[in-house]
Amino acid sequence: MRARRCPLSAETSTEAYDEAFDETGETAYGARAGGRRARGGRSVPRWRAALLRAAPALALFAVARVTGMLVMAGWAWHIDRPPRRTLARSWDSDWYLLIAENGYGRTLRWPDGAVQSDLAFFPLYPGLVRAITDVTPVTSGTAGLLVSWTAAGAAAWGIYAIGERLYGRRTATALVVVWGLLPHAVVLSMAYTEPVLTAFAAWSLYAVLTRRWLWAGALAALAGLARPNGIAVAAAVLLVAAYELVRCRGRGPWRLWAGAALAPAGWCGYVLYVGFRKGDPLGGYFAVQRGWTSRFDFGVGALRVVRDIVLRPTVLPLVVALAVVAASVVLFALFALDRPPLALVVYTAVLVLITVGGSGFFESKPRFLLPAFPLLLPVARGLARARPGTAVVVTAALAGLSFAYGAYLLTWSPIAL
């Protein structure tokens, strides 16, 4: 395998990968020239070969999510709740779809003085919904679900691509399946923004791993327009770019500089837009977030909630949220000890830090962690090495928990997701 001192080009990384072997002993790609040979001698494009390799994992992911939706729908019908509206118009979904229908400008004022503005919600998801409703006869709720389902599939493929590149097909498949069976995975089937963020994040990180800097920066910019914690993707791209430039004494290609400049553009652009609109360019957006009781206080507010959960009777979603957050900290330690690529470490660390250190909506913290798929790599590697019977039992247990808890969250839970 050929090595270079400054491996900053996509070609260098791709050549190295083409010569690597996966867990099955087969080359990860076929012919170096651009794919592998199909029967009959035709060359298969590289992206199609990658999709074919990912197809079994994506099929399992689709089965998991469709089954989860059917379980939720069956229970919703049983209690006379419309399943489609439950998926499309629950909690924050309604805010996003109203932005898609009417634009920004909605504000709720509560008796206790709290002011909740729709400027807290980033614009990419409602923009995509509006684009679909402008060119098709579907409603905004249907468009929102189509965006989320498509993004969830794209995210699963990106997660598979990263897992395959690092650890082979078996681990990549396990990673996708476990991600689709998390307790809060029902969010991936709702009109919510987590699937969109995860899709752009996964492919941006994959672009970093393959040294495709323009793609990495552009996708990071889109991730930054999807959700507030999309800044984690930009942080990963920027720190990896800085590391590579230090290694090469500042002699990086122009694509590296351009990708690094693009990465934070989406997040910074929207934060500044809200700031100027509120008359405070640097603090306006964070003032809007404080109206939603959301602020970064290094975990002080979260610790108060934890104290109440431990000392007083409370609702199930808060108990599960505490368990998920605690598990995320442990999983991050296990993940980091394996010395994964810097991009994945930075991305995951920022997501965990924002989740653990932020106050407000403790019950939503597991949802905020859904894009942190690298946390599941230790679990996926363990499943990939386990005996088939053990893997089946663990997967079935995860599925039962995910489907039952997802139905509970959307039909019985007394607090928002």
Image (cartoon, grey):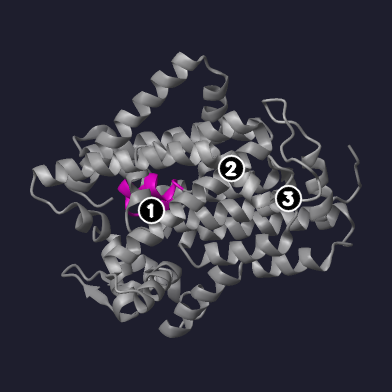
Q: Nearer the viewer, residue 90 or 60?
A: 60
Residue 375 seen in the current view:
yes
Residue 135 place in picture, x, y as percent: 38, 77
**Is tag 3's residue or tag 2's residue first in the polypeptide sequence?**
2
Amino acid type, mark 2:
Leu
Identify the residue position indicated by label 1 in the image: 359
**Is tag 2's residue or tag 1's residue first in the polypeptide sequence?**
2
Check residue 262 for magenta coloring: no
Residue 328 seen in the current view:
no
Q: What residue span does the magenta drawing correspond to? A: 358-370
Identified at 82% across, 53% down, the residue is 11
Q: Nearer the viewer, mark 2 or mark 1?
A: 2
**Is tag 1's residue or tag 3's residue first in the polypeptide sequence?**
3
Residue 201 place in picture, x, y as percent: 56, 54
Q: CA distance from mark 3 to mark 2?
A: 19 Å
Q: Give yes or no for contact between labels 3 and 2 (Cβ–Cβ under 8 Å).
A: no
- Can you tell which mark lies on residue 194? none
Identify the residue position indicated by label 2 in the image: 52
Judging from the image, what secondary structure is the residue with disc 1 in? strand
Identify the residue position indicated by label 3 in the image: 210
Amino acid type, mark 3:
Thr
Amino acid type, mark 1:
Ser
Identified at 20% across, 45% down, the residue is 73
In which quadrant will I find the N terminus?
Answer: top right
Check residue 360 for magenta coloring: yes
Judging from the image, what secondary structure is the residue with disc 2 in? helix
Identified at 67% across, 57% down, the residue is 237
